[in-house]
Image (cartoon, rainbow, N blue to C red):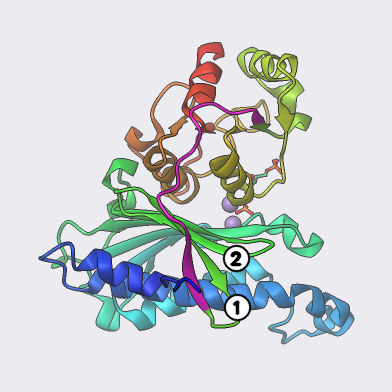
Amino acid sequence: MATLKTLNEFIIEKQSEHHNATGEFSRLFGDITIAAKIINREVNKAGLVDITGAYGTENVQGEAQQKLDVYANEIFIGALRNGGECAAIASEEDEDIVILDGPSANSKYLVAMDPLDGSSNIDVNVSIGTIFSIFKRKDTSVPVTRDEFLRKGIEQVAAGYVIYGSSTMLVYTTGSGVNGFTLDPSIGEFCLSHPDMKIKEDGKIYSINEGNINISTKGVKEYVQDCQEQLFSARYIGSLVADFHRNLLKGGIYIYPATEKAPNGKLRLLYECSPLAMLAEQAGGKASDGKNRIMEIDPTELHQRVPYYVGSTKMVEKAESYL
Ligand code: AHG
Ligand code: MN
Ligand code: MN
């Protein structure tokens, strides 16, 4: 039997390639994987909780009443706080940044995250995910501010996601390719299963909420028509992570455009679009807001939204040509 390489082993191996690495990044990553494993465990119990749910929903005190996205947020913040390598977190679930004091106060790293992506899919047993983006602080001697998170995607030192699907996977990049690890539940370890992932230059899958087509711009309508004329497959789960993951493996485009309802689209730049843009580019794909490279957008707000076109390079370029 071939020996499996665990995520831990992989990270330590990578660390030793950087002679001035201190191990802090590896430990930060370790904290993220611990949180991912805990969330995975809870996600897998979601159905059981629902079966006994009548009590749960009536429990006024109740932890069981907590929505999984709030729970996931707490798990991540707790893991990063205990780990001590992250100075502050920007999360979809928190209006402001969460500053981690104690041993974390002078830590080098900042994490932006969507702790639970696709939360409308939890109750219906459809894949959901976690997205994270990591920045290095420029100056660790000063207190962290909200503005420190307003960084371009190109400044990310790492980005990744976890998909809780038919199996649980963690996919990440530190800027030298994309690697995917599948959780082996029997040993509780993420093992390298998808080394050096590449997205096809062109694809035949388009992922967009077509229910919004009538409130989309002419360019988006025309691009979708173009996909239909070529008999492409429409695949849209409603969990960005899951739609992105499928298109990464098979070739395709994910679109969340500007609509009349949401003039800047729905997805958030810092903890949804930027990290997946880094992954897409590292896999040979492309990510754009229709005009500009996502990775070069200078954010002005923590929870800023942007229209999003991500996936196979040729598909993203063709979509742009319609806009
Ligand atoms: P979240 O669960 O983190 O709020 O994200 C939901 C996002 C994304 O995952 C998904 O692709 C999109 O919302 C679906 O939106 P529509 O229901 O408008 O298609
Ligand atoms: Mn999300
Ligand atoms: Mn979310």
Counting from the top left corner in percent of width and height, residue 250 is at 59, 39
Counting from the top left corner in percent of width and height, residue 216 is at 68, 22
The vertical placement of 226 against 293, above or below, is: above
User: What amino acid is found at the position of numbered circle 1 in the picture?
Assistant: Pro
Image quadrant containing the C terminus: top right
Counting from the top left corner in percent of width and height, residue 53 is at 85, 79
Q: Secondary structure at mark 1?
A: loop
Tell me which segment is drawn in magenta: 189-205
* Residue ranking furthest to the left: 20
Side (left or right) of 170 relative to 243: left
Counting from the top left corner in percent of width and height, residue 268 is at 51, 44
User: What amino acid is found at the position of numbered circle 2 in the picture?
Assistant: Thr
Q: Which of disc 1 and disc 2 is earlier in sequence? A: 2
Say the numbered circle drawn on residue 185: 1
Would you say the residues marked 2 and 1 are in contact, meaning their CB atoms lie under 8 Å apart? yes
Residue at x 42%, y 44% (from the top left corner): 274
Side (left or right) of 16 relative to 300: left
Say which of 274 and 285 sits in front. 285
Q: Mark 2 CB in 8 Å range of ligand 3?
A: no
Say which of 242 and 138 sits in front. 242
* Residue 191 lies within the magenta run: yes
Side (left or right) of 162 relative to 44: left
Say the numbered circle drawn on residue 84: none
The vertical placement of 76 against 269, above or below, is: below
* Residue ranking furthest to the front: 1
From the image, tell me which residue sits under label 2: 168
Q: Secondary structure at mark 2?
A: strand
